[in-house]
Image (cartoon, rainbow, N blue to C red):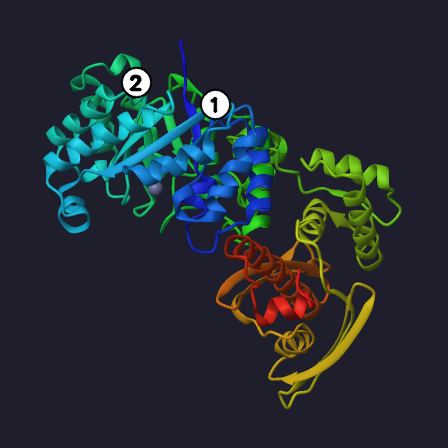
Amino acid sequence: MPEKVFVFDTTLRDGEQSPGCSMNLEEKLEMARQLDRLGVDILEAGFPVASEGDSEAVKAIAAEIRRPIVAALARANQLDIDRAWAAVKEAARPRIHTFLATSDIHLEHKLHKTRDEVLKQIGWAVGYARSFCDNVEFSPEDAGRTDRSYLIECCHAAVEAGAVVLNLPDTVGYCMEPEYQQMFADVQARVPGMDRVMLSTHTHDDLGMAVANTLAGIRGGARQVECTINGIGERAGNAALEEVVMALYVRRDVFPAFTDIRTEELFASSQLLTRLTGMAVQRNKAIVGRNAFAHEAGIHQDGVLKKAITYEIITPQTIGMPSNQIVLGKHSGRHALSKRYEELGYQLTKPELERAYELFSRLADHKKNVYDEDLIAIVNEGFEHIPEMFTLKLFQTVSSSEGRSTATVELEKDGEVFHDSATAEGPCDAAFRAIDRIVGVPGTIVDFSVHTVGPGTDGVAEVTIRARFEGREFTGKSTSHNVVEAAARAYLQAANKAAYELKRAAESATARSGSVHSNEMVDRFFPGGY
Ligand SMILES: [Zn+2]
């Protein structure tokens, strides 16, 4: 009988803590809802001791997402475990996930502790976590480089203290498959009481082995896999959830295991994460990359047209990827649009549909064929959960071959219209500076990427921007036929997010200290205080 493999998603913890992937509370909630639709068994919502924001996000997710187990991460100390429990205790099924490094390298250089001290601390921490919560997971960090006999002792201590899941991480992405598989077999065979404990994989992709090692762990006896959407995570990332799930699905002939993931939600999950973080996956990314189902070579196209199985081991429908067919034009109505969005995995509310329809009509005026990718871009542009403070009313640039460009922008806020212009080396920079002059606080561009959306020369440009305002980074994303306009809209979106977040931060600082936070940008956006 095939056995179930439990999918532990750590997109919102290991994934979110990697550079370029941070999300605010609303964004984390939106991602958590999608992970719930996807059918993950365990959702690691964050690391509550890390920040007030992390703690709030875990609380909000625990309160709303009721089907999966919701886990919170804690180092093996009292403060961390207290904070983790405080954040996750309202969950329908809470879990505390505590960890402590066990490799000699970490003991010597990071913890400055002896093996005996660490062993005692493991027993204490797991026991302390169990005093709050029946569902406790323990991870010996850097298990992959831990002396095997000592690892067995550490696992034994955790099991005796009441851990129900033992997660054996290859924290640094160092292991090869046979080693990783053997570690699971050894722990399973040599740790007493393993009949009551589930083994779990946690792998990193430093050598490109994350997914392969996860599958090796399953062969070694693991029945929980820790992974992230699009493989985001520390450094080279974690095992990509979509790849692990599809490997088990496509090769169910060789794995006596299955997951309860709804594969047709994989593409929507990948797209949503990209939209929320601004971090796109490479085109040739397995399963969810744009080219994953594109057949360019004539001989392949011919084969696929005759019978898809000649070159496709997965159909696009299995993962919910829209086929790249022409769907809509300027005569299509709201109903057709809403139906197509449903097929693409987007449940739009009425106001969202109205807004999408407006953008769609504008696009359909410019280009004769509107492809699924255009529709996805339209949704991506419009539906940030950040209230738009300034909206772009008018935009104009003049460039000359001599190199200087001038941009004029008109922004509206609460019915009041502001306009200004600026000159810079290029049209995008001129637009950003003109926006800065109205908004009042300059942002610095950290990352700027453009790609075309949809096939053909009438595709729209999608611009993603990361900019730093007052030391914090924010992303904005927009699409337009005009690259400079898309850039200006993306930049403005980042500035609006910055204002929103700075206001929230100032409010909670005020609530804590009772003093009024003074901050140039906040004052500019919210004159008169709040
Ligand atoms: Zn990790």
Q: Is residue 514 above or below residue 93?
A: below
Cβ of disc 2 within 8 Å of ligand 1?
A: no
Residue neighbourhood size for the residue with mark 2, other residues' Cα within 10 Å, grouped as few (<14), some (14–19), many (≥20): some
Q: Position of residue 373 (x, y in %)?
A: 67, 47
**Residue at image mark 2:** 197
Labels 2 and 1: the sequence-earlier one:
1
Quadrant showing the C terminus: bottom right
Q: Position of residue 169 (x, y in %)?
A: 28, 36
Quadrant of residue 86 within the rendered picture:
top left
Residue neighbourhood size for the residue with mark 1, other residues' Cα within 10 Å, grouped as few (<14), some (14–19), many (≥20): some
Q: Residue furthest front?
A: 514
Q: Ligand 1 is located in which of the four quadrants?
A: top left
Q: Is residue 486 left or right of residue 202?
A: right
Q: Is residue 105 above or below residue 316?
A: below
The three-letter code of the residue at mark 1 reads Arg
The one nearer the camera, 479 or 251, is: 479
Q: Is residue 20 above or below residue 223?
A: below
Residue at 59%, 35% (x, y): give it. 34
Question: Can the viewer see residue 295?
Answer: no
Quadrant of residue 77 within the rendered picture:
top left
The three-letter code of the residue at mark 2 reads Val
Quadrant of residue 255 within the rendered picture:
top left
At numbered mark 1, what does the secondary structure look like: helix, strand or loop? loop
Q: Position of residue 362 (x, y in %)?
A: 82, 57
Question: Can the viewer see residue 133?
Answer: yes
At numbered mark 2, what does the secondary structure look like: helix, strand or loop? loop
Q: Is residue 234 left or right of residue 195?
A: right
Report the label total.
Answer: 2
- Disc 2/disc 1 C-alpha distance (Å): 17 Å
**Callout in the foreground (2, 1):** 1
Q: Which mark is residue 93?
A: 1
The one nearer the camera, 364 or 111, is: 111
